[in-house]
Amino acid sequence: MKIFTLEDYSQMCRLGAELICDIVRDKPDAVLGLATGSTVIGVYRDICAEFDKGLSFARTVTINLDEYVGLGATHPQSYAYYMKHHLFDKVDIRLADTHIPNGMAPDLDRECDRYDSLLDKFPRDVQLLGLGSDGHIAFNEPGSPFTSRTRVVQLADNTVKDNSRLFDNIDDVPRFAVSMGIADIMSARKIVLLANGANKAQAVENMIRGKVDESCPASILQTHPDVTVILDQTAASLLR
Ligand code: GLP
């Protein structure tokens, strides 16, 4: 695990974007595993800046981690909407080459199978990740099997509370999501995880120093051969 503790959020995002853009420069048809959440917004801003300077994503394929069950692509809190707003509408990627689970699919089990087939077809060159304050990655909450693949998951109360800041009312936060599994995340060639803020410090410590255990899903990353963790000072505060 390579760990970078940087001065501020803008430096974190610059490094995260650089790592991803370097992959696209070397391999224009790279498959990028993408994440949502507040932490990675700045990474997308910096990736868009590289596009403005001439980097093309026209041959790139993207596969997102997760989507809320019951939110369609036009819902402002859906991850499909987020990705269009922060990245897809701003670069030259072909929308047909972007993939996000469909949280509105009439048969969610079938949707999970469809997503697993996609993951098998497109091995990811890099997987971008944020970190839940309870140590979740994607929506793999504590207790998720390390062998898990795409499935419908129930959000932990803590996650519903954390994510409620983006909704008008906590009751509007969906309780279920379709999430890539931990085994899917681990199959990416390279992983880049960002975490900032004091509310992530405990999860960061458990991820890096804790026992590799399903009670902290992110702790499995200790066993991946190529992980870069990018932190700010407050998220890294318990590591000193
Ligand atoms: C959400 C997402 C995760 C994200 C995490 C952190 O629930 N499913 O993919 O990484 O929680 O979110 P944030 O960056 O907003 O703190």
Image (cartoon, grey):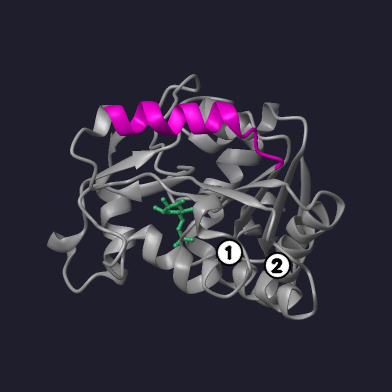
Query: Compared to 142, does 113 lie above or below?
Result: above
Looking at the image, which residue sits at the far top? 147
The stretch drawn in magenta includes residue 112: yes
Q: Position of residue 175 (x, y in %)?
A: 21, 47
Residue at 74% x, 70% y: name it: 14
Which comes sooner in the sequence, label 2 or label 1?
A: 2
The residue closer to the viewer here, 28 or 211, is 28
The stretch of residues the image draws in magenta is 110-125
Q: Position of residue 94 (x, y in %)?
A: 57, 59
Residue at 39% x, 39% y: name it: 179
Left or right of residue 213, residue 56 in this image: right
Q: Amino acid at mark 1?
A: Asn
Q: Amino acid at mark 2?
A: Met
Left or right of residue 214, residue 220 in this image: right
Q: Position of residue 113 (x, y in %)?
A: 37, 26
The secondary structure type at the circle numbered 1 is: loop
Residue at 73% x, 40% y: name it: 190
The reply to whether residue 143 is in sight is no
Disc 1 crowd, CA 10 A, few/some/many (<14, 14-19, 20+): many
Mark on residue 196? 1
Q: Which quadrant: the N terminus?
A: top right
Q: Position of residue 166 (x, y in %)?
A: 31, 70
The secondary structure type at the circle numbered 2 is: helix
- Ligand 1 within 8 Å, label 1 CB: no
Mark on residue 142? none
Residue denoted by label 2: 12
Total numbered labels placed on residues in the image: 2
Query: Compared to 59, does 179 lie above or below?
Result: above
Disc 2 crowd, CA 10 A, few/some/many (<14, 14-19, 20+): many
Residue 11 found in image quarter: bottom right
Residue 110 found in image quarter: top left
Q: Quadrant of ligand 1?
A: bottom left
